[in-house]
Image (cartoon, rainbow, N blue to C red):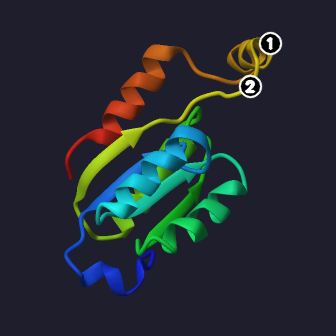
Amino acid sequence: MRELGMHASSGRPLALVTGGSSGIGRELARQFALHGFDLVIGGSSDRVEEAAAALRLNGAAVVPVRSDLATYDGVEAAWKAVQETGRPLAAAALNAGIGGDRATRRAAVRNKFLPERVKTHRQAQMARPS
């Protein structure tokens, strides 16, 4: 079981933020932290650890998950991290996406990402109540 530190028994609600290591997702995670939530944040790069450390400065207990939500295993890893907290999920900001310029996004979609309806279905599964 992943540890959320002393906040786990504080009665704070738990939020999941995918794409929480940078950009809009990181700001969403910060807002959750500032408004009394503990967090599970996901990201596909090492920046997820850096973001978790910064969010902890806002008083939140944070579980970082490095995973690629374009894959089945990545989705499962994010959902497992939520379940391993042993706490109900109070909120979710499903913000994972592809950054970069138009050519980068096209290449990522062509070479890596699953059809949109599959990704949407998987995100809906993650958002389901416990």
Which residue is nearer to you in this view: 23 or 115? 23
Question: In the rendered image, which residue does mark 2 sit on?
Answer: 100
The x and y percentages for residue 96 are 53, 35
What residue is at 41 percent from the left and 31 percent from the top?
122
Helix, strand, or loop for circle 2? loop
The x and y percentages for residue 66 are 62, 54
Which residue is nearer to you in this view: 65 or 115? 65
Question: In the rendered image, which residue does mark 1 sit on?
Answer: 103
The x and y percentages for residue 90 are 22, 54
Find the distance from the CA under tag 2 to the CA under tag 1.
Answer: 8 Å
The kind of residue tagged 2 is Gly
View extreme (bottom): residue: 6
Q: Residues within 10 Å of mark 1 (few under 14, many from 20)?
A: few
Q: From the viewer's perspective, is residue 87 above or below residue 110?
A: below
What residue is at 63 percent from the left and 23 percent from the top?
113
Quadrant the N terminus occupies: bottom left
Helix, strand, or loop for circle 1? helix
Q: Within the image, what quadrant is residue 110 found in?
A: top right
76 relative to 104 in the view: left or right? left
Is residue 76 at least partly visible in the picture? no
